[in-house]
Image: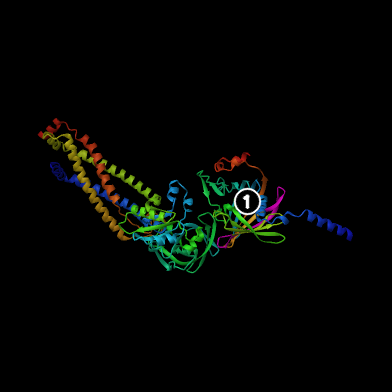
Amino acid sequence: MNTNKCLIFIFLTGALLLFPQESVYLKDPNEIIKKMDKIMYPNSKSELYLLSTRKGKKIEEDSMISYSKDINQKIIIRFTSPASEVGNDIILLEKNVWQIEKDSGRIIKVPSNLTFGDTDFSYGDVVRLNLSDNYIPEIISEDNVKWIINLTAKEKSAPYYRIEMEISKADFIPIKGTCFGKNDKVIKYMVYSDIKIFNGKRKPSKVTVTSPYLPDDVSFLETLSEELKEYSDRIFNKNNLEMRQEENQ
Amino acid sequence: MILPKLVLRNIFSHKQRNIIISLVITFVVSMLFIFLSFSDGEIENINKSIMGLENPGTDIVIKLKGYMQAKNANEKEEELDKMVIQNYPQIIKELKRFDFIKNIYVKTVPVFQNIYVNNNKFQDFAINGLESDNSSIIKQKLKIIEGHFFEKNEENVILIHNEIRKDLNVNIGDTVTIIGTDLFGQTVIQDFNIIGFYVPIIDNPENLRKVFADMTGYNMISGLFAGEANAINIDLNKNNSINIIINKLTEWADKNNHEIEFNPFSIINEEDLVIYEAFRLILIFISLIIILVIMIGIMNIISVNLQDRKKEIGSYYCLGAEKRFLIYLYSFEILTVNAFSTIFGILVGLLIRFIINSIKYTTRDPGMQLVFGSDKFYLGLSISTILYIFIGIVSITLLTSVKTLNTSLKVSPSEAIREVEE
């Protein structure tokens, strides 16, 4: 028995040495962030649900379908409920967020930190400007389970000046994020939870956002479904907000 | 010389008719004058209240070089707001040496932010930056009800409108957190200490959500670095030509390698007051229609009156007068009556204006403040209003009289002579 145990031990050690976990090798924070972005934001069609509450009471509830490409560099968000929001769709293009006003048909540029109604959830949080393109990462600490990576904005137009992300070493998925202003004050917290399998990959289906200044307000964005899909570039343009060509693909 | 004498004779020989016409025109003119003075007053109030705080009238505005080119190319407002002047304290220091400059101060664009206090969120406050020592123009337009204006060493401090303090439930010394988006689209956050509550000298509902911050605090929430500014305003001493000064300053800037341009205030701010000026145009159009209708009525009276003056007309024809002379004569007669009535109507309007303004009616109702342009009901006065009314009456009189008289003076010579014989 002891011999068998030893053999198993030697076998496993050898296996680990010959085939180590990818995370053991990855030390480049850029690569970590890129891998995380790739897992979190594949080219896909997703169903999203946003709920905001204040002292337990619902203040905002939206259902959306997103069509995304190139690690969220191109995203279209179509509102499916409530009825008042259906038609006020959003597109993210070249780091700019555009929205169509359904009543006038006008397409206007909106700040990516414009919030959904009275919530603290911004359009930037929903269209999820990817981190690798907008921030410079730096590993500030790590343990066996996670890295803590500091992300500093590359440009003045990035939604937050600095984000501190905890990323799981096992799955390269985010655990928690804290957004800071230029003066190092916390703006909001993001907690990633409800791990599910989407297209064979484990990732959090829910991100919960809270603010230290409004402790009674809680918002979360949940991914209900995700279908991997390749969309052509031509549907990612402002005119398509009206034409809805992605529905024919 | 005979024409004026005949005109005066005709006017006094038809006293009753002319008195009635004069009274009608005096009344209409005085009402039109009050109508348009209301619009003048609205614009003046807006200039002194909202614009006075946010965008005070000045002579020259300094912007980053290329600003006007971008603006004329229809660049969006948010992109124009990102064009900032570098090292403005040095620029102001150097410009102060010019003796033609009376005042020079930084002008910021409002940044729209939310205020978080006592676990509550209050949305859409316009935060403007003010320097403690260079803001006399704005300071003159504010009355500090409680607290004090910024002092030189104070940082991250704000002044809030006194009407809002109850909603926010705050007092002097309280700290509020301001969170929002800066001029470049990044989320910003900053704690501010309340040092005072203000009331504008001339108030307007749009001022309620105006917050004034010191420049350090403003820079934090606007995304500007220290030394950056959206614009610098220059007030000149009197009797200086703006265009000559602009040329001088442009030369100075080029010589000292400052990437700035100088523009007259009127060119930078032509979009301001668009709504109220559009409203004024509508009022002018309506008053034109009123004048036209009144004059058509008056000319009808005159043509009826001329029917009764066939004897007089016949006499003129017998004396060898031509139709053209008679048209001049009667047109001049009507014009004289109308012109004097207009002047009298304007004087009556001025008197009514004086009486109404001396009441100094004020209101706290935001709806009424929007209509008045501020919290004070004020009838303004502009030369353009007086000239417009006078020229309007005179030109419409001439137009209507020529047309009417042409028809009314078609008296056949035989008919005219018969009238004379009778």
Residue B411 in view: yes
Q: Residue at x 35, y 49 (%)?
A: B280
User: Image check: B91 left or right of B240?
Assistant: right
Residue B263 relative to residue B222: left or right: left
Helix, strand or loop for the magenta stretch, by majority? strand
Q: Please say whether residue A196 is one of the residues in the magenta stretch.
A: yes
Image quadrant where one finds the C terminus of chain A: top right
In the displayed structure image, the side of residue B278 where residue A129 appears, left or right:
right
Camera-nearest residue between B78 and B3: B78
Image quadrant where residue B253 sits: bottom left
Residue located beneath label 1 in the image: A49
In the image, is residue A72 above or below residue B330? below
Q: Secondary structure beneath disc 1?
A: strand
**Magenta residues?**
A180-204
Q: Amino acid at mark 1?
A: Tyr
Q: Residue furthest front?
A: B255
Position of residue B183 in the picture relative to residue B396 (left or right): right
Residue B49 spot, x, y in % from top left? 39, 58
Q: Is A139 or B273 nearer to us in this picture? A: A139
Residue B31 in sight: no
Residue B68 x/y as whole percent: 42, 49
Please report the residue visible at 36 percent of the width from the left and 58 percent of the height from the top.
Answer: B235
Number of on-image labels: 1
Please say which color scheme the image uses. Answer: rainbow
Q: Residue at x 47, y 49 (%)?
A: B76
**Percent position (x, y) of residue B341?**
22, 48
The quadrant of the picture occupied by the N terminus of chain A is bottom right
Q: Position of residue B150 (x, y in %)?
A: 44, 66
Specify the farthest residue to the left: B421
Q: Is residue B128 magenta?
A: no
